[in-house]
Amino acid sequence: MKDGIIEFLKIYLVFILFAVWINLFLEISLRFIFEIPETLDVKGIMIFFSIFNFFGALIFFFRKYKAKIMGLLSLVLGQVCEFSFMRPEWVQKIYALEIGMDVIMPFIISSIIYWFPAWLIPSYVIHRYLKKMIL
């Protein structure tokens, strides 16, 4: 039991480090490139991804899915979060049936840059490099 808890905490640490590093970096850097109407909430991002990646680490701990499957799960669950409670401006435009490039591009960007790598990268790193060292 104790070994399982320690193993889970190691997995969660890898998930949270990559998620916070990648997503916080993207949130800050993409604001210099694109016009993002939502305000930057670093504390909120960290809290959200701590919770989101807890579930990713839990799924990985019990199922040990490969990186691509973890990435697809992350993508689906991330978009569920976007449409259910995050509701950025582009989601609100979809609900209003105002679909154009200003809606399609943020959907593609959030899917490819934010959600797919959120669990893909940590699970890939664990499978590829860290399995023998930390787990």
Image: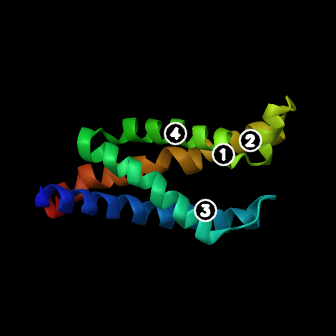
Task: Give the answer, above or below, for where 47 lies relative to 67.
Answer: below
Q: CA distance from mark 4 to mark 1?
A: 12 Å
- The amino acid at mark 4 is Leu
The answer to which of 114 and 2 lies nearer the viewer is 2
In the picture, residue 101 is in which quadrant? top right
- Counting residues from the N terminus, which is met first, the one under dot 3 or under dot 4? 3
The answer to which of 49 and 131 lies nearer the viewer is 49
Q: CA distance from mark 1 to mark 3?
A: 21 Å
Q: CA distance from mark 3 to mark 4?
A: 19 Å
> Could you say whether the residue bearing mark 2 is in a helix, strand or loop?
helix
Which residue bears the numbered disc 4? 77
- The amino acid at mark 1 is Phe
Of the 4 image quadrants, the one containing the N terminus is: bottom left
- Image check: 41 left or right of 5? right
- Image check: 8 left or right of 104? left
Residue 44 on image: x %, y %? 61, 65
Which residue bears the numbered disc 2? 105
Which residue bears the numbered disc 3? 26
Who's the residue at 25% across and 56% down the image? 8
> Could you say whether the residue bearing mark 4 is in a helix, strand or loop?
helix
Q: Any mark on residue 85, and which?
A: 1
- Counting residues from the N terminus, which is met first, the one under dot 2 or under dot 4? 4
